[in-house]
Amino acid sequence: MFQAPTLSAPGGATEKHAPRRALFARLAPYASVLLAILAIALIWLDAFDDIFLADDRTQLQRILVAAFLTAILLPLAFLIIRYEKGLARARDAAEAAMRARSEFLAVMSHEIRTPLNAVLGFASTLLESKLDTEQRLNATALHGAGDDLLRLLNDILDFSALDAGRIPFEDASFSPAAVVDTTVGLAKRSATAKGLALRIDIDPDLPSALRGDAGRLRQVLLNLLTNAVKFTDRGEIVVEARRLAGTAGHATVQWSVTDSGVGIAPDRIEGVFGSFAQADSSVNRRFGGQGLGLAICKRIIDQMGGRIGAESVVGRGSTFTFSVKFPIAELAIDSEASDGSAIADLKAHIMALGRPLRILLAEDNPTNQLVGKQLLREFDANVSVASNGVEAVQSAGEFSYDVILMDMQMPEMDGIEATRAIRARTGVHARVPIVALTANAYPEDVKACLDAGMNGFVAKPVRKSALAE
């Protein structure tokens, strides 16, 4: 069952104190004026100090000095006001541009994920059916192209969110050794296909459990390992995990990926962590890719408070290394590890139920309605369809479903409103499990779904194993 992670956003304290900083920024120019007025007042008080004891010449000098300083301070104070107001306008414009970019990416993500859900869904269905050799080859190519598009979309969203400091990080116990094992398992097939040896070297002093975001660490390590496989034609790839240092309750762990591939020229190695960067212009033509992966890795590690770097010799290979300091945990619970048994478990659960599973699919897109039904056809399930939120609320009140799969963006009433309306009722119909099935994939979308009363969240394109789980 889906469980919401404990999230701690890097820069969370920054967001918390943002209103206070904005208030200070608006008061700053007026504070400058008040200080200028106070300075002028002190100057004139000094000018007229001991007025009865000073001679006329001394008094005139004091007045002239005071007038001169006043003539300097007053225009300076007003210049400060104009400058600060200009900065405030520029800051507001930058924030508005950032919001517009985020909104644009959110809309584009939703619009792309919706048809991509159909592409990958139907491709998966085709691959599970009886096909001749040519048809299977075409279906596999179609599914691979859809996967590539999904990876690119996720990279763009990750890059944008990391650039804006909006990526939340999970705070949960995990095994640093398991991060290596799982990641190597994901890359093993592609390495074996190229005839590459894949070796793991784990430090025996490595803590058995740490607290942090294993998923993001796995994302960084998988990116480095995927690049190593891509740029290596022969030899081996070694993945290491080492404990560098430690204090009471904390440990600094270093992961590294060493390959025997093409290598990177010394004058270009620093640039590989830049946005849309490749080692040289021929890399993209030969190996493909958009150059976002390492930029994302660097931002993730930077926001974790760690370091990432690389060493390389042209023609002999490269070593990419990153290290992060984590609190030591007592027990590792790897929430992302999966043994692939979710589908079998769901089938066993339905069998134990003794009847078909009753599912309400709330989805306005006809193509995705068909995809949802085909994803569920492997299970003993009766699937009803609601084309909008109003129909979903009405159906949920008339029939006792075992689960509702709820899209977020629907006409007449969206999934958030529909969920709140269902939860506002009394009785058994109000307690039906509701799982978001949506193309809205930002962390704040997950939070909005859970806050509305949903029990889980599955992002489109939907994988059968994720849906079963």
Image (cartoon, helix red, strand yellow):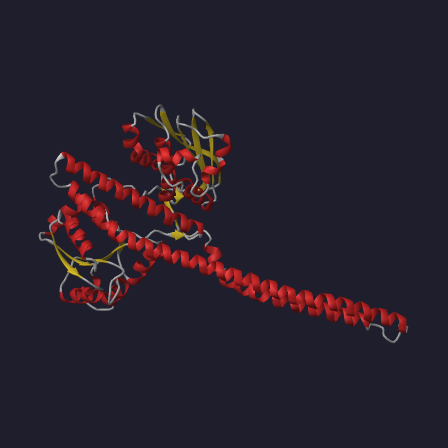
Q: Quadrant of residue 360?
A: bottom left
The x, y position of residue 403, in whole percent, is: 18, 57
In the image, taking residue 250 as reference, residue 389 lies left or right, namely: left
- 346 or 463, which is in the foreground? 463
Q: Is residue 469 visible?
A: no
Q: How many marks?
A: 0
The residue sitting at 46% across, 58% down in the picture is: 15
The residue sitting at 16% across, 53% down in the picture is: 370
Residue 315 vertical placement versus 82 (above, below): above
Q: Is residue 148 visible?
A: yes
- 411 or 391, which is in the foreground? 411
Residue 300 vertical placement versus 407 (above, below): above
In the image, taking residue 401 as reference, residue 106 lies left or right, namely: right
The x, y position of residue 121, in whole percent, is: 20, 47
The x, y position of residue 417, in whole percent, is: 27, 66
The x, y position of residue 53, in whole percent, is: 89, 73
The residue sitting at 43% across, 30% down in the picture is: 319
Residue 80 vertical placement versus 10 (above, below): below
- Residue at the limit of the structure toward the bottom, as seen here: 52
